[in-house]
Structures are given as structure tokens and as C-alpha cells.
Image: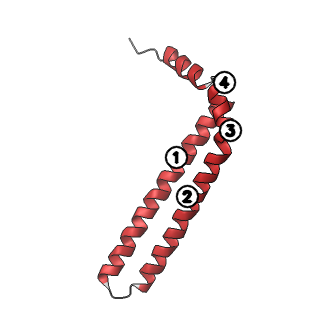
Amino acid sequence: MGFDTSAIKELVYSMLKTPEMVQFLSTYNVLTSVILAFVSIAVVVLIVFHIVRLSKSGDNPRDRQEAISGLAICSACLAVLGGIDIVYAIIVGVITG
């Protein structure tokens, strides 16, 4: 009575293992990794910037709230980037074998 997913898995696997997809990933794998690395470094620098802003805010509640909001946004962006990087690595590993 269950849904048979073997046909769907074979279809997706055959689509991802096409020579065009393998060539695309081999060509742009380094470029994608470099872009993800630069963006990750930029987000870490922004986190440090917001930590410094938070430490300089002192008794000003508006500045403190802006720094905390910036930290939260940068942390969420870093988490999303990490997730994208992990998914990308898994896809490349499956496709290139």
C-alpha cells in the first residue's frame, strides 16, 4: 500500500548524473566554493563589527538594540550559509561520485 519511490529515485539520479551536470559542477565547483568562502568571511566580519558596536553602545538603549538586531541577522545569515554549503557539498559528492 506504500508509495514506491524507487522509480523517482532512479529518475532523479539519472538526471543528476548527466554528463552536462558533471561538467558544470567540475567547472564551477571552485568558483562556487570561493564565493561561499568570501560571503562567509564577510558575515563573520559583520558579526565582529556588531559585537564592537554592542560594546560601544554603553547606556544607549537604541544603539544597543540596533547592535543586537544586527548580531541576530548576521548569525541567521551565517547559519543559512552553512546550510547551503552542506547541501552543496552533499549534492556535489553524490553527482561526481
- Residue contact at pointers 2 and 3, CB within 8 angstroms: no
Mark sitting on residue 53: none
Mark sitting on residue 84: 1
Residue at 60% from the left image edge and 38% from the top image edge: 90
Give the mark nearer the N terminus: 1 vs 3: 3
The residue wearing badge 4 is: 19
Q: Viewed as shown, does residue 96 lie left or right of 55?
A: right
Q: Quadrant of residue 63?
A: bottom left
Mark sitting on residue 39: 2
Give the mark nearer the N terminus: 3 vs 4: 4
Q: Nearer the viewer, mark 2 or mark 1?
A: 2
Give the mark nearer the N terminus: 1 vs 4: 4
For the residue labelled by badge 4, is the local secondary structure a helix, a strand or a loop? Answer: helix
Q: Quadrant of residue 72?
A: bottom left
Could you tell me the amino acid type at mark 3? Thr
Residue at 44% from the left image edge and 80% from the top image edge: 53
Residue at 60% from the left image edge and 58% from the top image edge: 38
Q: CA distance from mark 1 to mark 3?
A: 19 Å
The x, y position of residue 1, in whole percent, is 38, 11
Q: CA distance from mark 2 to mark 3?
A: 20 Å
Could you tell me the amino acid type at mark 2? Val
Q: CA distance from mark 2 to mark 1?
A: 12 Å
